[in-house]
Amino acid sequence: MNAGQMTIVARGDREIFITRSFDASSKLVYDAFTRPDLMKRWLFGPDGWELAVCEVDLRPGGAFRYVWRHKERGSNMGMGGVFVEIQAPAKVVHKELFDEDWTGGETVVTTLLSEAGGRTKMEMTVVYSSAEARDGALKSGMAGGMEAGYARLDKIFQDA
């Protein structure tokens, strides 16, 4: 898998499995996924959005809060959650829930990072509350938004 090629597939009854590689060390990728100053540079999906609120208490039991804002419409999309497991720079497990619960309940997200030869492979599993919630998320356009953010992250790594 080359940088820029995200895959997302349904797995089991309630899961999606996402893979993506980055031309960066696992430490750099981990920092980009966990440090608010870096997250605000790439984690905002399609153009026109920004990550207006990014609060992270990176420890098991620590909370996080993200609010995305559309720059022209002024609309917001918020989410919060709690970290379950942290193994820097290889693993983060967290629970999340959107303010407007379009995903059908809390999800559990496990992100694994593995480095080989200066490249890092991300494997992310998202477990939804039901098959309907998972299928709705897949139809929402989330894949396009995720890849837009990951493409920005590729650029940040290239410029570093």
Image (cartoon, rainbow, N blue to C red):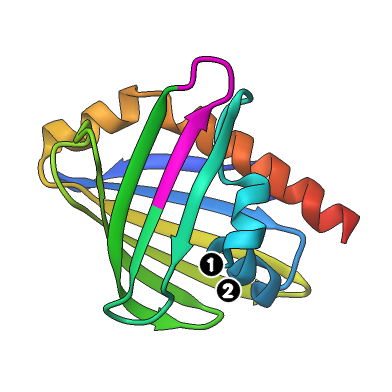
Residue 118 at x, y percent in the picture: 78, 72
Label for residue 104?
none
Decide whether residue 75 is among the magenta residues.
Answer: no
The residue shown at (28%, 59%) is 81
Image: 136 above or below 147: above
Residue 66 at x, y percent in the picture: 42, 49
Q: Is residue 49 left or right of residue 123?
A: right
Image: 43 above or below 37: above
Decide whether residue 70 is among the magenta residues.
Answer: yes
Comparing 32 with 158, the one in front is: 32
Residue 117 at x, y percent in the picture: 77, 75
Q: Tell me the kind of residue under disc 2.
A: Ser
Q: In which quarter of the image is the C terminus?
A: bottom right
Residue linked to disc 1: 34
Chain-order first, disc 1 or disc 2: 1
Q: What is the count of numbered marks?
A: 2
Quarter assignment of residue 100: top left
Magenta part of the protein: which range? 66-74
Q: Is residue 50 left or right of residue 64?
A: right
State the separation of the CA atoms marked 1 and 2.
16 Å
Residue 124 at x, y percent in the picture: 42, 57
Image: 20 above or below 63: above
Q: How crowded is mark 1: few (under 14 residues within 10 Å), some or many (20 or more)?
A: some
Label for residue 114?
2
Quarter assignment of residue 133: top left
The kind of secondary structure element at disc 2 is strand
Q: Residues within 10 Å of mark 2 (few under 14, many from 20)?
A: some
